[in-house]
Image: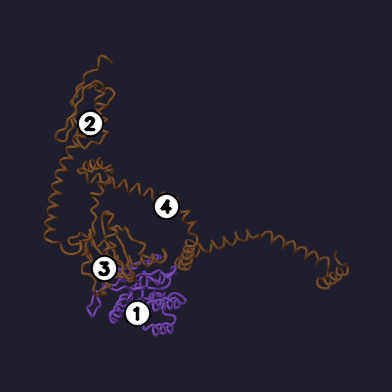
């Protein structure tokens, strides 16, 4: 079974940890907990259809700006990224652009996907911006909810497939 | 002094505007007084206090009505401020924390030492006298002898980790090694954690990363770390490392990295620990004569060790007997009373006479304070005080 490192990026409080915990532990914690630095999770998954097993080591990177080049250092060596935005916010996209740009700068050409999170309580306010982002980064977008679990597993599996298809 | 022409002109203007110049002047003066009062009342401190109360109420309300939003709004700023304060005020923070840290460390060390001593006492009561003997002979403390004998240093597993990703490139365990609870420490998580620490350390310590962090203590053992520019070698070990282990780990990393440089990534060793962790083997194979010589040397060493063991035991029997005699004979009340000490079957027996019961009890008590690794028996009847005293 091959092992891949995946980083989850996004602004402070957009639900990165909740998404990961939903995927890895199939649970959702109501109690918000600030993530300091980085948390590392591991999940063995089977990609349906291909009946292929992969092991994903998921790095949950703190959303608040980290000192120095720490965020970039945490990205190094990743095979793919999930960029998360919070749909309840007025304008979640600048932070998503910033995170996606940083990932592409450190690891050009690696697959990423966009998670528009909290879909259970909000809808996408600017579909045009989402389209522009998907075109710019050639990536899929998922309207996720860590609370209900909607689109969480498909998103991580889609990323794993993209990684495998690139032969990383 | 005011110009009378101007005063007259002002009065005329006021009269034209307000009808009665006197009444108008009084109104202006009243306004002036009110302005001064207001200024006095709203001094900077009072203003600050009033606004602070309003802000505190507003924050309290926000905390009650939408706590999540409040946290989201202020948490990044608080974190950034704390980080900024810490990085810009290193000396002050160290100065403020060091007394408390010193106390905590001292307390932790004292507690750990007590625990260790208790564990040793519980684990090795039978061997304690051997340690006591070695301690007497060498001048080294008993505890340190016990630790050396009980440390059981073992390499549990070795990992070669890719720097950055934390992915495990190669992994090895000594044959038959007990890895403990396999669920306690996932290999990939360990690799990720070490890589994350490396990334963190590069910023925190300024460049070096794990190059400067050579050892890590976890509940699952001690991790020894060595890094090349692209790889990290991690050895998970238990027990207390012998002093030479640091050199041996350097040697192992050097060996693995050289193989990778020579053969590329495909040359990853199947067995990381195939490199001998003990003193390095001599170059070239051993000849038949060398093997015969080694066997002879081992035989001689065993003979010498056996002879040394018996000689040592005999010498120590004599030492313990003499020590017991000295304690009894040296007691102030024993002047002129016969004393004899003999050793047989692990027991030192004192014979002779004592002046009274109290003296015999005192001698027994003195001997008990002296930690002899042998039992003591008394055959010393009370003879009464000498007539010449």
Identify the residue position indicated by label 4 in the image.
B101
The furthest residue to the front: B289
Q: CA distance from mark 3 to mark 4?
A: 40 Å
The image shows residue B246, relative to residue A64, as above or below, that is above
The image shows residue B324, relative to residue B195, as above or below, that is above
Q: Chain of mark 1?
A: A
The 10 Å Cα crowd at callout 4, few under 14, some 14 to 19, many 20 or more, is few
Q: Is residue B53 left or right of residue B246?
A: right
Q: Which chain is purple?
A: A
Q: CA distance from mark 1 to mark 3?
A: 29 Å
Is residue A95 or residue B142 the one in the foreground?
A: B142
Numbered badge on residue B324: 2
Numbered badge on residue B132: none
Q: CA distance from mark 1 to mark 4?
A: 45 Å
Identify the residue position indicated by label 1 in the image.
A110
Q: Chain of mark 4?
A: B
Identify the residue position indicated by label 3 in the image.
B256
């Amino acid at each position: 079974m091959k092992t891949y490192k995946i980083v989850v990026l996004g602004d402070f409080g957009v639900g990165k940890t909740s998404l990961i915990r939903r995927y890895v532990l199939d649970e959702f914690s109501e109690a918000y907990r600030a993530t300091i630095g980085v948390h590392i999770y591991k999940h063995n998954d089977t990609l349906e259809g291909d009946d292929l097993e992969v092991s994903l080591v998921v790095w949950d990177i703190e959303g608040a700006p980290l000192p120095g080049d720490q965020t970039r250092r945490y990205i190094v060596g990743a095979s793919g990224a999930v960029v998360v935005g919070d749909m309840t916010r007025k304008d979640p996209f600048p932070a998503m652009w910033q995170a996606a740009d940083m990932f592409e700068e450190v690891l050009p050409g690696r697959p990423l996907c966009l998670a528009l999170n909290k879909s259970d309580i909000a809808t996408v306010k600017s579909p045009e911006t989402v389209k522009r982002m998907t075109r710019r980064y050639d990536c899929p977008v998922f309207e996720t909810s860590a609370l209900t679990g909607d689109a969480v597993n498909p998103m991580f599996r889609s990323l794993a497939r993209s990684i495998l298809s690139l032969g990383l | 002094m005011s110009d009378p022409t101007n005063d007259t002109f002002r009065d005329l203007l006021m009269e034209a505007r307000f009808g009665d110049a006197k009444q108008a002047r009084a109104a202006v003066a009243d306004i002036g007084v009110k302005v001064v009062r207001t200024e006095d009342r709203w001094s900077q401190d009072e203003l600050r206090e009033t606004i602070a109360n309003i802000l505190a109420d507003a924050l309290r309300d926000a905390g009650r009505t939408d706590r999540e939003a409040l946290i989201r709004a202020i948490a990044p700023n608080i974190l950034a401020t704390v980080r900024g304060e810490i990085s810009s005020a290193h000396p002050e923070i160290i100065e403020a924390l060091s007394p408390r840290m010193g106390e905590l460390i001292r307390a932790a060390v004292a507690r750990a030492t007590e625990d260790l001593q208790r564990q040793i006492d519980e684990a090795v009561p039978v061997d304690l006298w051997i340690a006591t003997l070695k301690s007497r002979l060498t001048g080294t403390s008993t505890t340190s002898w016990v630790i050396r004998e009980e440390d059981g240093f073992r390499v549990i597993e070795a990992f070669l980790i890719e720097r950055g990703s934390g992915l495990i490139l190669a992994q090895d365990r000594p044959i038959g090694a007990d890895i403990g609870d396999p669920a306690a420490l996932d290999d990939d998580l360990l690799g990720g954690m070490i890589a994350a620490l490396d990334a963190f350390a590069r910023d925190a310590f300024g460049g070096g990363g794990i190059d400067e962090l050579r050892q890590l203590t976890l509940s699952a053992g001690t991790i020894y770390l060595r890094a090349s520019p692209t790889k990290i070698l991690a050895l998970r070990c238990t027990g207390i490392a012998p002093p030479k282990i640091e050199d041996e780990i350097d040697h192992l990393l050097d060996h693995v990295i050289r193989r990778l440089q020579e053969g590329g990534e495909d040359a990853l060793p199947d067995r990381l620990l195939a490199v001998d962790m003990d003193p390095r083997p001599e170059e070239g194979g051993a000849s038949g004569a060398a093997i015969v010589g080694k066997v002879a040397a081992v035989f001689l060493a065993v003979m010498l060790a056996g002879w040394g063991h018996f000689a040592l035991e005999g010498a120590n029997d004599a030492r313990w007997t003499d020590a017991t005699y000295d304690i009894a004979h040296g007691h102030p009340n024993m002047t002129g009373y016969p004393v004899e000490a003999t050793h047989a079957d692990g027991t030192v027996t004192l014979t002779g006479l004592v002046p009274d019961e109290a003296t015999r009890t005192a001698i027994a008590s003195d001997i008990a304070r002296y930690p002899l690794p042998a039992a003591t028996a008394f055959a010393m009847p009370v003879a009464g005080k000498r007539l010449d005293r």
